[in-house]
Image: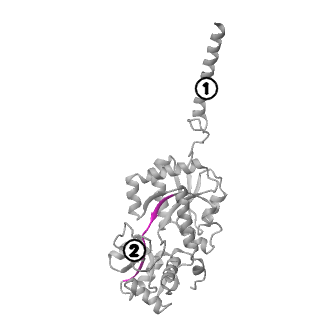
Amino acid sequence: MKKFLSILTAAALALSFAACGASSSGAGTSTAASGSDTPAYPEKPIQLLIPTKPGGDVDTNGRLLSKNIEPYLGTTLVPVNVDGGGGIAMQQVAEAAPDGYTFFYYNYAMFTSGVVEKLSYTYDDFKPLVMTCKSDTQILVVSKDSPYQTVDDLVKAITEQPGTVRFAATYGAPSQFHADAIEEATGGEFKKIDVSSGADKIVALLSGEIDVLSTTTGLMKDYIASDKVTVLGSLCKERSQFAPDIPTFNEQGVDLGEGFETAFVIYGHKDTPQYVVDKLVESVEAMAADEQAVTEFENGDFTLNVVYGEELDELLATMNDYYFGMKDLVTGDQF
């Protein structure tokens, strides 16, 4: 009988110690209460490096993301502008600890800069964590008094009088790729004029210093509404929900292949743990189901579109090949 009572007492003590241990683990360590070895994450604010100056689509999009994801992420996502063509932001992430507290946010300018070797890094030097949204509003416009009022007019001019139609382009920027893709598809040739900023390009178009400008519907809304420009077509593969009346170049007989839709992706250190990726994906998906967040992004002409894992890897590989397939054209350009 005494032996039986001793066994019961030992068992009770063991259960008591186990219960205390479980309680202590849940309250006093960063290990999840479920008993797994996964650390609690996040436990402090996260830096989102934006490799551009304030303004522009990456900055605008990054700030919308930072604002709308916070309730689901459980901490502040702090947008930090790091100018320098992307390289400085990438270097900071590459040299940071792979603990999930330093990311950078970029669109497909990641590829265009890589083609002309403006960057020391490529997208596969990092872990693409999650694509948050896309923008498919890239268009080609001319002034209202331009002689090129249709895609056919433009194609005829650059094929029959090569080098006479002035296209606002910046070396290594998406605008140069837009021009080169049209040249490749038509056999024509633009005269590329290097105009630095988006605002300067619009001024140059309206003043007659250039003939053709690749831009976005968002930037041109007021000019379209006031009938100051003519939209020749969309440079994306499919029509945008934000401008369904604008036909694509592909529809009008100029095959641009994959086209110039762009995606916005959070990149992390190559060794970012999977639990960090899982938390980000979960948070972005929750944000994308929030009607207020959807509306705020759509007001900026951005479509929330969550892609991750193998699907994201395949998408980025396809677009990397598309841009690098134009490398000889781009690096051989004369400005």
Q: Which residue is mark 2?
A: 220
Please tell me which residue lies in front, 178 or 295: 178
Residue at the (43%, 68%) spot, across then down:
136
Can see residue 52? no
Determine the CA span between mark 2 and mark 1. Answer: 66 Å
Q: Position of residue 299 (x, y in %)?
A: 38, 62
Picture layout, residue 301 above or below residue 190 = above
Whether 133 is among the magenta residues is yes
Residue at the (36%, 80%) spot, across then down:
230
Frontmost of labels 2 and 1 is 1
Picture layout, residue 254 above or below residue 165 = above
Q: Residue 5: which quarter of the image?
A: top right
Callout 1: few (<14), some (14-19), or many (20+) C-alpha neighbours within 10 Å? few
Q: Position of residue 320 (x, y in %)?
A: 57, 68
Can see residue 257? yes
What's the amino acid at mark 1?
A: Ala
What's the amino acid at mark 2?
A: Met
Q: Which residue is mark 1?
A: 18
Q: Position of residue 43 (x, y in %)?
A: 57, 44
How would you classify the magenta stretch by its main secondary structure? strand
Callout 2: few (<14), some (14-19), or many (20+) C-alpha neighbours within 10 Å? some
Q: N-terminal of the two: label 2 or label 1?
A: 1
Please tell me whether mark 1 sits on a helix, a strand or a loop: helix
Q: Which residues are magenta?
A: 131-143
Please tell me whether mark 2 sits on a helix, a strand or a loop: helix
Q: Quadrant of the N terminus?
A: top right
Picture layout, residue 231 above or below residue 165 = above
Q: Position of residue 144 (x, y in %)?
A: 36, 84
Left or right for 184, reference 292: right
Direction bottom: furthest residue: 161
